[in-house]
Image (tube, rainbow, N blue to C red):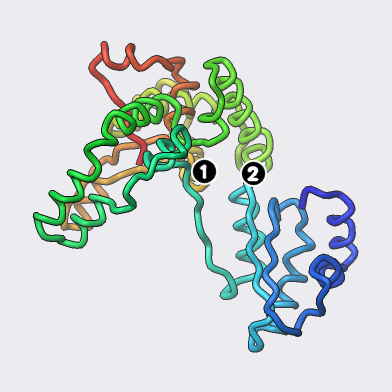
Amino acid sequence: MDVLAERQKVQEGGLQALIEEKVLQVIGNEPMIRVAIDEAQKCPELFDQIKVLYDLYKDKSKIKFVLTGSGFLYLHQLSAETLARRIELFHLREFGLREIMLLDNPAVALPKTSLFDLIAQNAEPNVIQDTIRQLQPFKPLLEESIKKQIIWGGFPEVLILSEVNDRLQYLGGYIQTYLEKDVRGIDTIADLPLYQQLMQILAEQTGSVRDEQKIVDALHCARNTLKKYRGYLIATLLLRELFPFIKSTIKRIVKSPKGYLQNNGLISYLTGIHDLSILEKNRSCRTSC
């Protein structure tokens, strides 16, 4: 809801009228109406009206809504409170290797078959070998794409920029927006600089086994504060923790997990390392889950 006039109309209870005005059709008639609303969290009044319209027409299958937004926690809270049992949540990930390659080489007809899918499906060895042969001509392009992904991640807005400084400026703005809009609104985050320092430490330690005491000593904070702040990083999809694969649930929980910032571009910005040759000299690499 970035258009102010439309947002004001919804705030006054006019969502149904706005939809019918846009599609030139009365809700309930044929065909079904599909409504996509971006940045839905900017207009909290929207959700009660969606609930009313959904409940009114759900048995008739006359209207469907797709809501998107960048403020994940706030959007999740609004939808969970108002649209419980009426929604399905999807987390949109950044570009993967295939998409990055096609972004740079749109005319390339890359085979759609995935080796990972074939392996997961227990495909026959000859089928896997055929797929490898089909992908072999694209190896140089894929290698260039994975080098870019290791340093810059998969945000399309970053990848379409050609200059290093422009990419760093975008990533810096992304982090600032995240801190100012998503994190500052969380009542229990009392120390924003501490939160940012934690992000920097986790970026430097991405892929390493979690060392709780070392981080507490570095930040000079209480262990409960660290646990809470790290929990918000996980909840806002910036951080992911992977526990070792152990059949025993108790043993798996007791073991310390490895932590990964989800975007390599943010790691590059926070660590100041945005040159692949530096990583290669240090014999280190980073992996986004």
Q: Secondary structure at mark 1?
A: helix
Report which quarter residue 126 is drawn in: bottom left
Crowd around label 1: few <14 · some 14–19 · many ≥20 (10 Å): some
Q: Position of residue 196 (x, y in %)?
A: 55, 27
**Quick one: 192 or 121, which is closer to the camera?**
121
Q: Of marks 1 and 2, which one's residue comes earlier in the chain?
A: 2
* Element on which disc 2 rests: loop
Residue sitting at x 9%, y 55%: 125
Residue 202 in the image: above or below residue 253? above
- Residue ID for mark 2: 186
Where is residue 177? Give x, y as percent: 65, 33
Instruction: Indicate the amino acid at tag 1.
Output: Tyr
Determine which residue is flagged by label 1: 232
In the image, residue 65 sits, relative to residue 143, either above or below, namely below
Query: Residue at left 42%, top 30%?
Result: 264
* Residue type indicated by callout 2: Ile
Q: Quadrant of the C terminus?
A: top left
Q: Does any portion of residue 216 appear in the rendered image? A: no
Answer with left or right where residue 186 lies relative to residue 151.
Answer: right
Q: Residue at x 45, y 39 (%)?
A: 107
For the residue pair 246 and 100, the one nearer the viewer reads as 100
Q: Say if mark 1 contacts mark 2, CB within 8 Å.
A: yes
Q: Nearer the viewer, residue 122 or 46?
A: 122
The image shows residue 144 at horizontal and vertical percentages of: 35, 26
Q: How far across and how far down the image is residue 79, in percent?
A: 64, 63
- Marks 1 and 2 sit apart, C-alpha to C-alpha, by 9 Å
